Amino acid sequence: MEDPQKSENRRQIPTDIVPNILLRLPTKDFVRSSCVCKVWCSIVADPSFRKLHVAHHAAATASSSEPAEVLLVTETREPGRSDEASVFNLSSSKPLSQVAIPSRYRLAGVCNDLLCFALNHDQAPPIVCNPATGETLQLPKAPPLPTGEELSHLFVLGFNPPTKEYKMFRLSFPQWHGSRHETNSYIAVYTLGGGGGWRQCSYRSRFHPIKSPAPVHIDGNIFVPAANLRARAARMFVLDVATETPRLYRIPYNYSDYHESWEMVADGFDLNGQMCLVVNVGFHPQPRLKAQFWVMQPPGEIEGKDDDDKLYWDLRYSFFLDGPFVFNRPRGVWIDHTQTLCYRVGNSVYSYNTRGGHSPSSNDVVDSLLFDQRLELPDSPCPSVSSCWLKFSRWSICGGYRPSLLSPLVFALPPSQDEKANKRPQFEHTLLRALRASATSKPNRQPTRSSDKRKKEKIVNIL
């Protein structure tokens, strides 16, 4: 009869090949594997091995066509507590993490496995977070800007696939988007983990980025809508993360179709690796509102073409909206793991299954589609007008998330380069030196009466 011990050893995986197996697992399975046994748990918990898995996973993700995941991010502010952001994965309907964020910070965007929180201030340090691990890192402050200019600021996180570098961009531009002539705008760049600090350059343009809709990061490019309100014209500001240079392209948006006081009635998102812009049309006159989904040609295919009048966009879908469109309500658009298009207008979400529905070709006229269904969402906790700064809650849905175990702390500056870390030892040294000086110094004693009398007698004798 066979020895049970030998039979058990035959079923075990050799220890030397376990790391190679774990290295090839997707992130979710990689985390679950820590529950198999103590040996596997120790391998998964090793920071150096996690970093190696992140590098391998990033390379595999860049070359695969696997769709990104969608996150639900809620931001809450209550009196007596720090602001908090809660992150949920819509694909699994499970919470990922809860992180504390500085007061009045907002979600600035998603870039692969990292979230960015920032404040509209030129020197407010942005924060990056990995929702899978719950770890956050505050980046150094951006450099000051020229004084005397009223500027708005937009922080955007980008990723350069060839070098696997993350870069934080601060876009600074005039608050009024209506100049007839080219004006100065500024781009400040910080490479995470590079150790080189912020660098800044300026450029001149008549079109300047706008804050709504939110920026979108796709394959090493950052897409930000830009406008010139005086000219009633709009462009797509495309920032190459590798070269850190911007370009402008015409977009299918006509400001003359909307009220002059309205912001851009459009939203952008990543549609399976392509930049997609959703434009609402049909306001004047009012036959029926539509949501048009325009897809931009990849920037690499149109690079070097300076034809400002040409439209490098194709109409992919056009849907009728059966409900009322409220201009000042939150909007958003994403595509989930089942390839279902979701379009949010206020508390209504319209959905359309792209797999089971009409799949348009380049020659189709897509102008009569209806959404599959319309869902009504519950009202979010809203404060009264008088207490809006004391208690606040908002939520947003973001696509483009690709989970990993990358820790933002690997990008932290060493103590020799961290200005904030150096200030505390300097303060402590100065404080100790001052306290020691006060303890060793001789007290200034008041002269006694006898000593005063002797001094007076001495003075009289001299005189």
Image: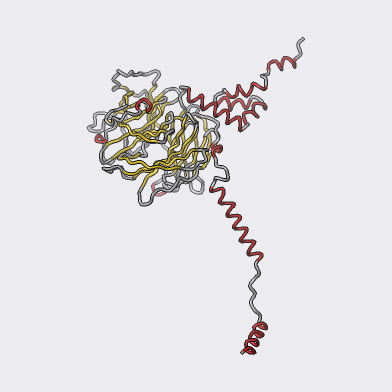
Task: Give residue 413's position: percent from left, percent from top.
Answer: 55, 42
The residue positioned farthest toward the front in the image shown: 462
Residue lying at 51% horizontally and 24% vertically, measured from the top left: 60
Nearest to the observer: residue 156 or residue 35: 156
- The image quarter containing residue 176 is top left
206 relative position to 195: left or right:
left
Residue lying at 63% horizontally and 61% vertically, measured from the top left: 435
Residue lying at 32% horizontally and 40% vertically, measured from the top left: 205
Task: Give residue 223's position: percent from left, percent from top.
Answer: 38, 33
Task: Give residue 153's position: percent from left, percent from top.
Answer: 39, 43
- As displayed, is residue 138 above or below residue 353? below
User: For the N terminus, which image quadrant?
Assistant: top right
User: For the C terminus, which image quadrant?
Assistant: bottom right
The residue positioned farthest toward the left in the image shown: 285
Determine if residue 284 is in view: yes
Determine if residue 321 is in view: no
Residue lying at 57% horizontally and 31% vertically, measured from the top left: 51
- As displayed, is residue 204 above or below residue 279? below
Nearest to the observer: residue 351 or residue 101: 101
95 relative position to 368: left or right:
right
Task: Give residue 259's position: percent from left, percent from top.
Answer: 26, 38
Q: How many marks?
A: 0
- The image quarter containing residue 458 is bottom right
354 relative position to 262: left or right:
right
The colour style of the image is secondary structure
Nearest to the observer: residue 172 or residue 127: 172
